[in-house]
Image (cartoon, grey):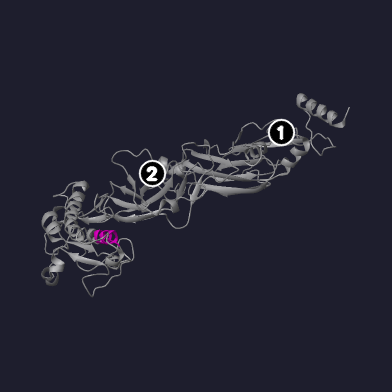
Amino acid sequence: MSFSTIRCILFLLAIANGTVGVTGKADDFTTTPSTSQRISGSAQEHETHYDADFLGMDRSIIGRADAGVTGLENNTPMNANILPNTTVSYEFPWSTILNSRSDESHDYHEEHEELRRRQDTSSTVYITINTCLQPTFADGTIQANPPQLTLWVSQSDQNQLPGPQTTQFTQHLQLDSGYANITLFNVVGNVYIGVFAAASNVTSGVWNYEIAASVDQNYHSYISGLPALFMSDSDPYAALLVTKNLSAAVPAGVNTTGLPPQLSLFVQQSNETAIRGLEKSFCGLSKNARMQGILPNIPDGGIETSITAYGEQIFYVPNLNATSNYTAMLAIAPNATSTVPGGGGAVYNSTTFITKRLANCQIIYGLSFCSSVAYAVPANPGNFSSMSDLAAQYDNSTAANYQFFNYSLQQIPCNTTPTAQYSLVKTCDDCAAAYKTWLCAVSIPRCSDWQYPYNYTPYSGGLSSDDSGYAIDFLMPRNAAQSPIAATTDLIQPVNDSTLLNWVAFNSSRNSDLITKTIAPGPYMEVLPCEDLCYEL
């Protein structure tokens, strides 16, 4: 009888007996006791037993698994509650790590040398966690963030329950704003994980979290660096936010739910505390943020979103308060198929903005003709109660004015021979597009809060104070002589400056027939068009 046969028989007898652990090298067999610690609150329980270890086999296949330890599968999130002063334990088995590698099949029934070769390979393991819910302060106030969870990791079989009371052979990381990730390189065995919740005498309730392990990439993600979301404009009751081009906004490796990869949005008033400590967690934001636009299930009357012709995504956020600070978090919703690499969603670095003060500036966007218009324009809610009515008034008037230019352009032989063309560099189509862009910009001016007297307070930075003139950088007073609309009467100080009242440029609007007479918004500041419009013409 060969030695290999004898070794297999001894191994099977050890398993059947259940009291003998086999450890050591290929030609050396010993029995070894082991002690594991289970942590529940501050109490520690000790149980002595024998683990069976054998070349080519790990404890996920043979031997006895620790009670109270949850096994993790590759790219499969686990959700759990945790009480204060408690550790919850997990294991990412070596067999799962090997079988999840995309470059090998890892059949344990192959020849011994092939098995040894595969056992000797190492893997990278990505562990991520999101806090979904957290305790509340017992007195109902928020002086600081609730305590953050801590993620503990061990790669040693000598510490299979890592945590603050079993710290040997561990590394740990406290969550930051509800998110943490630990990446392990050159993993060659089981990975043991602990999630610890600290004791607190000022909060009540439990934490809820989602944890995942992967051999592919981070299952959950937080994308730091420069924000991918920018405020286009606001009015007192809404804001218009825009992303950069989606192809650049979505990083490689983050799984998205649709094509094109549309993003979701969370918005919270900056002084509210519901999401404090959860700003980097998708499930934390989705369960706690007051205003949400999670695709594809956006409720009526909530955040609206669309994709522009330039590949950007626009978010219209209604139901805001005037002159209030808000924080917006752009996010990628978890993949509809939850067990794919990187399918746990991602949260971007936050963006802050402040709403305008006066109701005679109102956001419009999504115009049929002037499709590039997406900002606040001079308005009067008493004459045009809805955004769609106001937008149609501006759009139809501009389209009608453009038609006169179109008639003139038709007199030009655009499709003639090269020697007869006006220009070989630009075509009639280029001319039409440039004129349309310019016409929309000057016919539908951008509106900002009226500022009088000259204590200019910028809303988003970049404007300089200058008492030497009436136009501050790119702001121009308009309609100074017109009475304020009813919604702004108490907020606008009467103008008694003869210069403002007598100069036509200051006491009327750029598009006087439409704005001054039909819309009648009262005094407002116009944001002058960019110089690029002239260069394009």
Amino acid under disc 2? Ala
Q: Residue 374: horizontal and vertical position, in percent?
A: 28, 54
2 vs 1, front mark: 1
Viewer can see residue 409: yes
Q: Is residue 150 above or below residue 406?
A: above
**Toward the viewer: 53 or 517?**
517
For disc 2, the marked residue is 289
Q: Residue 9: horizontal and vertical position, in percent?
A: 82, 26
Q: Residue 108 bears which disc, if any? A: 1
Element assignment for label 1: loop
Q: Residue 205: horizontal and vertical position, in percent?
A: 47, 38
Element assignment for label 2: loop
Q: Is residue 214 above or below residue 13?
A: below
Q: Is residue 430 magenta?
A: yes
Q: Residue 40: horizontal and vertical position, in percent?
A: 60, 36
Look at the image and tell me in which quarter the C terminus lies.
Answer: bottom left
- Give the farthest residue toward the bottom: 468
Q: What's drawn in magenta, residue-wise?
A: 427-437
What residue is drawn where x is 15% and y is 68%? 505
Q: Is residue 330 magenta?
A: no
Amino acid under disc 1? Tyr
* Residue 191 location, quadrant: top right
What residue is drawn where x is 41% and y is 41%? 286
What residue is drawn where x is 28% and y is 48%? 320
Q: Main secondary structure of the magenta part?
A: helix
Q: Is residue 482 left or right of residue 270?
A: left
| 3D distance between C-alphas at marks 2 and 1 | 48 Å
